[in-house]
Amino acid sequence: MVLGTYKEVVAARSTDKQIQKLAQDGGIVSGLFCYALDEGLIDGAVVAGPSDVMWKPEPMVAMSSDEILAAAGTKYTFSPNVWMLKKAVRQYGLEKLGTVAIPCQSMGIRKMQSYPFGVKNVASKIALMLGIFCMENFPYESLRTFISEKAGVDFDLVEKMDIGKGKFWIETADQTLSIPLKETHGYEQNGCKVCLDYVAELADVSTGSVGTPDGWSTVFVRTDAGETIFKQAVEAGVIETKPMDNVKPGLGLLEKLATDKKTKAMKVIDERKAMGLPVPFKGSAEKEDPLANV
Ligand SMILES: Cc1cc2nc3c(=O)[nH]c(=O)nc-3n(C[C@H](O)[C@H](O)[C@H](O)COP(=O)(O)OP(=O)(O)OC[C@H]3O[C@@H](n4cnc5c(N)ncnc54)[C@H](O)[C@@H]3O)c2cc1C
Ligand code: SF4
């Protein structure tokens, strides 16, 4: 199960024109959060909001559609959203909490729910975890450096960033530039080299761009909670879907990328173990099914 456990996988996008305009891909994260807020299924969501520093996200508790939309779009550096969950419950008094999480954050949240030492009242309030796919992430200074030095673009003029088709894309108001991903290697966060999850396997619903055409998203509906809200949003016409088999490049590309990520990471894990270094997983390439969720 290289893509984790799921009930359904579809191509999907938000039907809302404003969300389509502001979102990174199909606007599944923003669309589902706005719908869940409107329907009272959550009373707020921790998202990666803007900060005073360009492209440096700051976790924020969004309690309206406007705030959800202010945080739309991918920032290719860390947003410590998990850290904000406690504040969302303790200071904002939220009872039904939504959050968006990259795979490592999804793992942290599930761990917090399984072993809620000191966080029982926070862990039990998480009603909807939307996971986003992640191949790698960049420290803020790395991102700034390779964009300004390799693409020669003033960082403050960048309007959108995206990874796709083997390149890191940078859009400004009047041009679109790209850097081959082989040139961004070395700038990634070191910890990402031992990461075994590409498609946020532990989220309620996970989504990303790979597998579907521009403007659409690949969506895995994984848990009962995820299924309930996703089905309701589709029935309400907030999200439109297409069968995954009808779109290109489809699930095969995701399976390949997820397998490559796990295989590479497993090698690094075994190398680190051989050196006596601590690794955060019990998995090993020597296991019968090294690609199983560990
Ligand atoms: C570091 C990183 C690497 C990624 N790599 C891939 C990849 O390899 N393949 C792939 O298909 N997709 C990848 N994605 C996911 C993709 O870029 C989109 O985030 C995803 O498709 C959701 O799009 P959307 O239109 O549904 O979301 P939108 O409606 O645009 O909402 C995006 C949500 O993500 C939150 N967010 C933005 N940046 C971060 C962050 N750094 N950390 C946590 N939350 C954040 C925003 O606050 C917002 O709520 C990556 C995302 C990140 C953050
Ligand atoms: S590659 Fe893994 S560890 Fe790195 S940011 Fe993405 S999910 Fe987290």
Image (tube, rainbow, N blue to C red):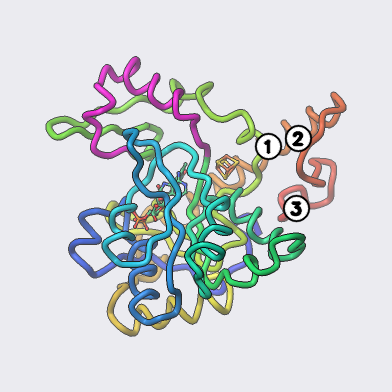
Q: Residue at x 12, y 31 (%)?
A: 174
**Dot 2 alpha-carbon crowd within 10 angstroms: few under 14, some 14 to 19, many 20 or more:** many
Q: CA distance from mark 1 to mark 2?
A: 6 Å
Check if mark 3's residue and mark 1's residue have beta carbons within 8 Å.
Answer: no
Residue 58 in percent (x, y) is at: 42, 44
Q: Earlier in the sequence, mark 2 or mark 3?
A: 2
**Is residue 150 inside the magenta stretch?**
yes
Task: Residue 76: tell me if it is visible.
Answer: yes
Which residues make up the magenta segment? Answer: 136-161
Under mark 1, the amino acid is Val
Under mark 3, the amino acid is Val
Q: Would you name the residue on which mark 3 appears? A: 294
Q: Quadrant of the N terminus?
A: bottom right
Q: Residue at x 40, y 42 (%)?
A: 57
Q: What is the count of numbered marks?
A: 3
**Looking at the rendered structure, which numbered label has been put on residue 57?**
none
Question: Is disc 2 placed on a helix, strand or loop?
Answer: helix
**Dot 1 alpha-carbon crowd within 10 angstroms: few under 14, some 14 to 19, many 20 or more:** many
